[in-house]
Image: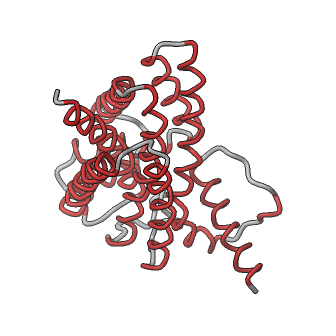
Amino acid sequence: MLMSVAMQQLRLFFIALQFFTRIPIPRWIGFEASWLQHAARYFALVGVVIAIVCAAVYALAAIWLPAPVAAVLSTAAGVYLTGAFHEDGFADVCDGLGGASTPERALEIMKDSRVGAYGAIGISLLLGLKCLLLAELPQQMVVAALLLAHPCSRLAASALIWRLDYVRVTDSKAKPIAQHMSSGEFAIACGSTLLVLGLLAYFGWLRWSTIGIALCAAGLMTLWMAHKLVSRIGGYTGDGLGAVQQLSEVAIYLGILVSLHSASGN
């Protein structure tokens, strides 16, 4: 019985990994559409995998290349690994919320695969800011920042699934993986994230005060974005989840940088 439960949880993790990354999964995992609905509990854990890849790229690149170049390569690795899944969602939200006055029109624009001016400008500024923030951090802290930001930002997106209403059943980015999340499933997501936070603090890679400031920044960004989505379209879409992930990731980098500057007295 215990083995069966563990095997099912492993399947759900691999389903989430396949959905959010280009990483191939073993064929023996199999697939059932109903599994997608319960795989959201492992979004944050998928973020750990992505963080490890991005951190490895940064660490290797930083040996031979300047920090800004290593930051760009690390960010590019993350974009490639996920197929720009979240970045595309952020761009769509920029177009939808920036170029529409009604919820119906916003949803129509967000569904369009073409990228408009708001989306192009928004994603350019976001990626530029992300690379700049990573380049400004001390090199020995970038790996820790990535390990903090990727799972926590995906936990932030999971919080929307847990608390908000899904507003469009035709949204291919969220159907059927992100229409509902139970409190128990959200607790599992929180548990995997807390494990990462504990390891970062235990090994001294980040102080708890730094982690706290970073998480507060991500929390405020998530609350603001959730309010924006509810007030404009009545809830979340798959694109909205991508936007929350991207913005809260950047907020975490900002929080870490603010913490470092405050500690140094600058």
Position in image of residue 31 (x %, y %): 72, 66
Quarter of the image where the C terminus is located: top left
Q: Residue at x 60, y 38 (%)?
A: 53
Can you name the residue that lies furthest to the right here? 28
| Residue 199 left/right relative to 159 | right
What's the residue at 52%, 29% (across, down)?
A: 74
Q: Position of residue 50 (x, y in %)?
A: 56, 44
| Residue in the image at 33% along x and 24% along y | 136
Identify the image quadrant of the N terminus.
bottom right
> As displayed, is residue 67 above or below residue 215?
above
In the foreground, 105 or 255: 255
Left/right placement of residue 79 relative to residue 68 reads: right
Eyeballing the image, is 29 above or below 200?
Answer: below
The answer to whether residue 236 is left or right of residue 86 is left
Against 163, is 202 above or below?
A: above
Residue furthest to the bottom in view is 1
- Residue 21 position in % (x across, y down): 60, 47
Q: How is the image coloured?
A: secondary structure
